[in-house]
Image: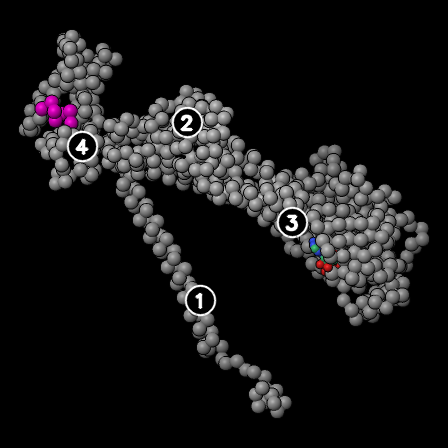
Amino acid sequence: MTDASLNGAEEPRRRGSIHEIDARTRKRNAREARFKGYGIGAILVGLFFLVVLAVSIVSSGLPAFTKTVVKVEFTMSQEQYDEAESTLFKTAAYSDIFIAQLRDTMEEEGVEVAFDEGSIERLLGKVGGTLREFYTANEDQLGQPVTFQLPASSRVDGYFNGRVTREGLTESRFLELTDLDLVDALADAGVITQAFNWTFLTGSDSGVDNPGGAGIGVSVVGSFFMMLVVLVLALPIGVAASIYLEEFAPQNKFTDLIEVNISNLAAVPSIVFGILGLAVFIQFMHLPQSAPLVGGLVLTLMTLPTIIISTRASLKSVPPSIRDAALGVGASKMQSVFHHVLPLAMPGILTGTIIGLAQALGETAPLLLIGMVGFVARDYPDGFVGGFTEANSAMPAQIYTWAARADASFYEKAWGGIIVLLVFLLLMNVIAILLRRKFERRW
Amino acid sequence: MYDAPLRKTDVETKNTKIVAQDVNVYYGDTHAIKDVSVDLLDKTVTAFIGPSGCGKSTFLRCLNRMNDTIDICRVEGKISLDGEDIYDKRVDPVQLRAKVGMVFQKPNPFPKSIYDNVAYGPKIHGLAKNKADLDDIVEKALRRGAIWDEVKDRLHAPGTGLSGGQQQRLCIARAVATEPEVLLMDEPCSALDPIATGQVEELIDELRGQYSVIIVTHSMQQAARVSQKTAFFHLGNLVEYGDTSQIFTNPEDSRTESYITGRIG
Ligand SMILES: Nc1ncnc2c1ncn2[C@@H]1O[C@H](COP(=O)(O)OP(=O)(O)OP(=O)(O)O)[C@@H](O)[C@H]1O
Ligand SMILES: [Mg+2]
């Protein structure tokens, strides 16, 4: 094309010095740098949202892990006890004795603040009931000083967490401005303190009017038994189905149909599985309502496609030459799969299973349909079998129930519940990573 | 062109080991092997040569029914081993493959230790009575695979950690460890250096004493060096089959001549 080539004198094309970047290369490098920039930007945006999420969860949820307690030493003599027990309104009598003693204590401490029955009730709820319960059960403690840790009401709790402020307080029958003076005075005297809220970790759902007593422990147990059902059912069924489909089944219309349907199942909204569980397991098979067994069955249905798809993918990723090698030395199909293919696919299968389990652990909608709502989680189940059959809730359902309640301190519990849930999910991911490491180390 | 000395053959005294009659193989609509009939002899090395894609591997894989694993593959015709039809309904391909071992084109050791690679076959076929026995079998096989000296100090290191050529020799050792009667080798030396190739060829020559060895190769020199019989495939047809010396010095078909002199393929 050039003159030179037209003349037939082929001049070999020379490129410039490699010490000078030419325009083309510069453009290409610029494009690469831009692409890297986009990537870093995307990661930063992701990180930003992650941090926002983490900060808001932790800051909203942490108060759920502390509680405000009023720590008082109280002594009740045998005479006071007998007298209180002989009155008509027994708990009121207890309250009176308590208030009298508290007043004395405050005077000794030199705290000057006025309070009456009403303010104590607003602060501590029905103290008399708590005291009476204690002394009727422990008559031997009469006449001796006993230190009581009485949980403060949720509003006082909120005052310490910053949820309730003096300025924003609308006086109501639950809390008056003067009560806050009392609270401050008690705090100064070291009577009111913050303590770790073990009840939140070990307790069960409480009534609508008792957010302080609410805990997630029982629903954690519910979730645990559900996961057990899912693991025991979904893992073997899912892996067996995948091995059959991937390694043994002939390729035909029928297996294609199954394949398409499994992929579709993975995309079915979880609430559909919930209503299916309600119809089949509870209404038709008469399994107990709200039972983790039923929840586990529903979640198994939901998790199976996930496990099957990931297991098949990891089986597919095992190089076919390994199968050929095994068959070539005279191994049967089954031997080749179990001796050679499965061990190589194991990390993938385990990862998929744990991701499936984690998904199931966070699932709420289907549980609500089969009655595993928060407020049924009242007591720890009786024994192992009871864990499956007794009515219980699960972590996400419990969180949902709390979030739906009017009282703001339940909202706080919901955030706290989310922290617990996330801790469990994190734990499962760590297990997944450790298992993968363990199996991958076998070269 | 071929100054490698051609081996004197004494084919007449050998028995037929494998008989193929009118074998046709289809991959879906692709007709990969067309009406191939051939008698493969016992205690003989037979080389399959031919241009890429002509069906050498396909035909080789028919002989131990490895094609069963390919869904779209269909085999027609009759292939018998020692007079028994290998595509008979009563045949379990697993049992057949214990008799007809295979070394693949690409080295494919199991991702296990070198020892376990070789011991696997004898274990699943119950060839070893005890651990010492198994150790013996493994050592013997590795020696025959011409790799013993290189791996004897690291038998429990992963087989996949060996070099390509070492891996291929490990695969050969693995195949001979199960004491097959027929050994199919699909380009076993394509990843080997001349020294290792020489060792493998020596091994093949040694195996000839007991087995029927069928080797696919792209190296004319190798075919000439190790085989007594040669089959030339072209576009799915078996063009010519005969004594190696005959094929390389005086081919009957013009296509054979063109191929071995380097004009087609
Ligand atoms: N799994 C398969 N599916 C479909 N077609 C195949 C398959 N394997 C081989 N073929 C086709 O069959 C024909 C023969 O292939 P084959 O592998 O037997 O050739 P070959 O002689 O071994 O070639 P090479 O020397 O390159 O290994 C080719 O046309 C190939 O495309
Ligand atoms: Mg081939």
The answer to whether A218 is drawn above or below residue B142 in the figure is: above
- What is the C-alpha distance between the residues marked 2 and 4? 35 Å
Label whose residue precedes the other's in the sequence (2 or 4) = 4
Residue A243, image x, y percentages: 61, 40
Which quadrant of the structure image shows residue B112?
Answer: top right
Residue bearing mark 4:
A156
- 2 vs 1, front mark: 2
Per the image, is B125 magenta? no
The amino acid type, in three-letter code, at marker 1 is Glu
Tell me if I can see residue B223 in this picture: no
Label whose residue precedes the other's in the sequence (4 or 1) = 1
Circles 4, 1 touching at the beta carbon (< 8 Å): no
Residue bearing mark 2:
A290
Residue A44, image x, y percentages: 36, 56
Tell me if I can see residue A241 in this picture: yes
Can you name the residue that lies furthest to the right here?
B12
- What is the C-alpha distance between the residues marked 2 and 1? 56 Å
The amino acid type, in three-letter code, at marker 3 is Pro
Residue bearing mark 1:
A32
The amino acid type, in three-letter code, at marker 4 is Val
